[in-house]
Amino acid sequence: MRTAALLCLTLFATPGMAVAAKPPVVVELFTAQGCASCGEANSYVGKLSERPGVLALTFPVDYWDYLGWADTFAKPEFSDRQKAYVTRLALRESYTPQVVVDGRAQAGGLQTDKVDKLLTTAAGGPRNPPDMAFIGPRRVDVGSGAAPRGGADVWLVRYDPRDQDVVVRKGDNRGQTVAHKNVVREIKRLGSWRGRPTAYRLPPPTEEGLATAVLVQSPDGGRILGVAMRDAPN
């Protein structure tokens, strides 16, 4: 953690540096290919991903696999992330499709009017994110700012920006084609941030063609404080 190198993190734009002066609103969709009502939500969030100022991430969960179709993208850590939101937002249980906006509020994935209102509220609310920048291919810097008591978590999220269609061959969605956009392929906690400039090392990607987001987030499914994004390499 090279603190001294970060004292210059006033973040004037320089080559190779990605700056998030005003972070996008983060929309997280928890979905499953075996969920009969998730296809429509997937399509809706895919459209949200095209809006300026929105980072839409699709987290396929694995707890519907027992119905007969193992989701081709699901990972246990995605279900764990949703469970943290269930606790934080005082919900009774996990469900799909679910949308979480900026870690602050949630709605059913088919409640599009409610999700739109949550997006408008999040975009118009007060925001004071730390400066964030990618430094080369293997480092991200987070500048100074107001951190929650006990600090925040820094998460690496790598996702596939392509449109992907999956034909489901068993279960409730048998014979249907389920569309996906911005499917998360990797999520990893990089460390803690306590309001002081800190550098974090990025591990090499597990797949080619993935875009990268780094989230600064209050612990245990709390609100998202800052976002840095980098497109997939050409």
Image (spheres, rainbow, N blue to C red):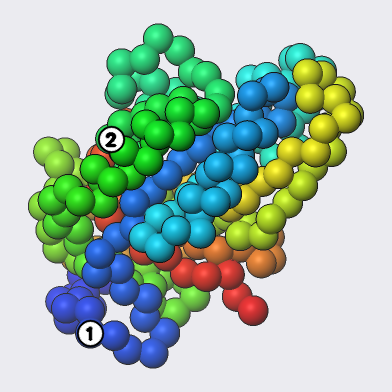
Tell me if 171 is positioned left or right of 234 in this view. right
Q: Label 2 sits on what residue type?
A: Arg
Q: Does residue 153 appear in this view? A: no
Quarter of the image that includes the N terminus = bottom left
Q: Position of residue 72 (x, y in %)?
A: 76, 38
- In depth, the one of 108 and 59 nearer the eye is 108
Q: Position of residue 227 (x, y in %)?
A: 33, 58
Tell me if 185 is positioned left or right of 175 in this view. left
Cα distance, mark 1 to mark 2? 30 Å
Q: Which residue is mark 2?
A: 104
Q: Which residue is mark 1?
A: 12
Quarter of the image that includes the C terminus = bottom right
Q: Position of residue 161 (x, y in %)?
A: 61, 60
Report if the CB atoms under discs 1 and 2 are less than 8 Å apart: no
Tell me if 110 is positioned left or right of 181 in this view. left
Q: Secondary structure at mark 2?
A: loop
Q: Does residue 12 appear in this view? A: yes
